[in-house]
Amino acid sequence: MSEHLVRAKTIRAQLLASMADGEFRGCTRLPRESVLAEKLGISRTQLRDVLASLEREGFITRRHGVGTIINSHVLDVQTRMDIEVEFLDMIRQSGHKPAVAFVRVSDGTADEKVAGQLRIPVGEAIIRISRLCTADGKPAIYCEDIIPKALAKEGYTLKDFKQPIFHFLKQFCATIPYMDLTDVRPAFADAALGEIFQVPIGTPLLNMDEVDFDIDGEPVFCSNEYFVDGIFRLTVMRKKL
């Protein structure tokens, strides 16, 4: 990731924190761009890039002649499904103590569904990473990530999968996901998921079936995620265009 992008992410996080819990909490608007840019130690051009990102995500609204309005009702949302958040942060944002119960890695071959999602031949070698995250010690999220083995360079170990999948993709696949397409649907625990979540067979779950793409539109991995009920309040923000 370039130094410019890292800086922009840092400023974005700083502004979000200031609006949610810091000096701008309770304010209806942000200061003028010239004042805010000076306070943050960046140019107005850099600030406008950050503000544009925050506006796309609904945290602020910029209106000509009015200024930059802080949308406190959006800032107060615990977990946004339309914004990529790492699992442990999602659990933490929901008011629980996060942990990783296990990470399991195995080699396999692509079945018809995975081959279609990743645009690889059926039977192509894949890496499957299974991960169970807990909230206050209870199973909360189970995820299976699948990466084409041809995409990863050699030399990785189980330790390299302990962090979120995006770290592995950057270090060993030289790629960063740019966007994803996700099917969201209800699911029910079968025998395997019942054992993982420690719930009876037939217990309702939320399933997110995701494919991540690089900036050129090529799929880099697919993921099947399951969320147990009663821990998360997952919200989607949709802007009326």
Image: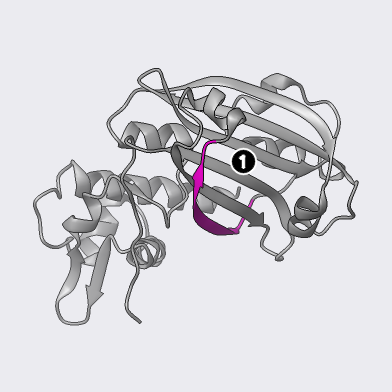
Q: As displayed, is residue 53 above or below residue 171? A: below
Q: Which residues are magenta?
A: 177-189
Say which quadrant the C terminus sits in.
bottom left
Q: Nearer the viewer, residue 16 or 177?
A: 177
Would residue 83 be counted in the magenta stretch?
Answer: no
Q: Quadrant of residue 33?
A: bottom left
**Of helix, strand and loop, which one carries label 1?**
helix
Would you name the residue on which mark 1 appears? Answer: 166
Q: Nearer the viewer, residue 56 or 195?
A: 195
Residue 160 percent location from the top left of the image: 69, 25
Q: Is residue 159 left or right of residue 110?
A: left
Amino acid at circle 1:
Phe
Q: Residue at x 40, y 17 (%)?
A: 137
Q: Residue at x 55, y 25 (%)?
A: 196
Q: As displayed, is residue 200 above or below residue 12? A: above
Q: As displayed, is residue 6 above or below residue 118? A: above
Q: Residue at x 44, y 36 (%)?
A: 203
Question: Could you tell me how many numbered marks the image carries?
Answer: 1
Q: Residue at x 76, y 51 (%)?
A: 114
Residue 50 percent location from the top left of the image: 38, 60
Q: Nearer the viewer, residue 154 or 11?
A: 154
